[in-house]
Image (tube, coloured by chain):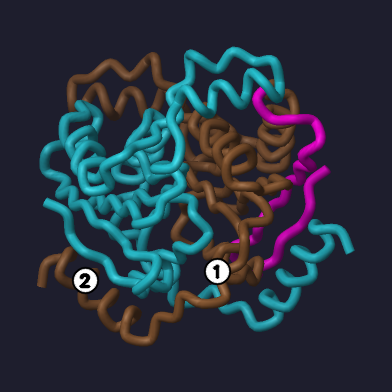
Chain colours: A brown, B cyan
Amino acid sequence: MTMVGALLEANARFAETFDASGIHAPRFALLTCMDGRLDPARFLDLAPGDAHVIRNAGGRADADAIRSIVVSYRLLGTREIVVVHHEDCGMMRFTNDELRDMLRADLGLDASQIDFLPFSDLDESVRVDVRMLRQCPLIPDAIPISGFVYDVSSGRLREVR
Amino acid sequence: MTMVGALLEANARFAETFDASGIHAPRFALLTCMDGRLDPARFLDLAPGDAHVIRNAGGRADADAIRSIVVSYRLLGTREIVVVHHEDCGMMRFTNDELRDMLRADLGLDASQIDFLPFSDLDESVRVDVRMLRQCPLIPDAIPISGFVYDVSSGRLREVR
């Protein structure tokens, strides 16, 4: 079976017992990493609708995350922002130059203008992104922003200040 | 209790029974919307690790999604891309000008340079983003890309061609 077929089959099983009632209004926007080991609905015990979940490589506060957060608070009513990075993140295993060299070798492309946003200090990456959001003029000062690290080996979250 | 306290308490309950064994290697990158009604791990029956999950307002193929997808396939081994937008998406309820006017009124800011990527035709928004990824020089032609719409009222996914 193709992957598309397998996904549609898995979804058909899900839809058989799907219940759309009891959806909450979104309370907060969560910015976290795309890593497949992270299931925020489970590790934060989110009810359907509870949070807007914004995910990218690293959980970084880049321009697109800010676009999404502005839509989230201004149009869709969230009132708090939570940033979660995680232990053993793939973003700590390469540098911009290494990835740019790979893309040049593979595809003959110059990606020197792209910052892939890798980092080497996990706690500091959380602080940098929380600070970036706090300082962003598009995000009102009244919106609380907190930062965390999730441990993929224990399932535990700890706050980063 | 503060929201941070409540999240940490919910997470402590989760971590009590957390089991990190049996994590899959990621097979594909999923690009979908931040909407809290979408729980892709459930509606695609994903096992932990199965997919990189990239989420933003609308599930749009913007520059940051492409940054994440490049990291996903080139460094972390995914081999397919799946785009999922959804019925009743908040991105169909405003225009760029309306949101820019709100930000000017609220914060005195000029956001005329930001495209918030709203859309009016749901199926077409999937086609546009699939095409954008297919045409992106940073993504090799050999990577299959498929597009879907998820129905938040039935839980059902349908392919968009």
- Residue receiving disc 1: A48
Quadrant location of the C terminus of chain A in the rendered image? top right
Q: Residue at x 44, y 60 (%)?
A: A36
Q: Are marks 2 and 1 in contact (CB under 8 Å)?
A: no
Task: Indicate the position of residue A147 as horizontal and vertical percent values.
Answer: 73, 46
| Mark 2 and mark 1: Cα distance apart in space | 21 Å
What's the residue type where badge 1 is placed? Pro
Magenta span contains residue B67: no
Q: Quadrant of residue A7?
A: bottom left
Q: Residue at x 46, y 42 (%)?
A: B57
Of all chains, the one bearing label 1 is A
> From which residue to which does the magenta span run?
A138-161
| Marking on residue A8 | 2
Residue B127 in view, yes or no: yes
Task: Indicate the position of residue A62 as horizontal and vertical percent values.
Answer: 54, 30
Say above or below: A66 vs B142: above
Give the residue furthest to the right. B1
User: Could you tell whether A93 is left or right of B81 in the image?
Assistant: right
Task: Indicate the position of residue B78 as horizontal and vertical percent values.
Answer: 29, 52
Q: Is B112 in front, or is B56?
A: B112
- Circle 1: is it few (<14), some (14-19), or many (20+) Cα within 10 Å? some
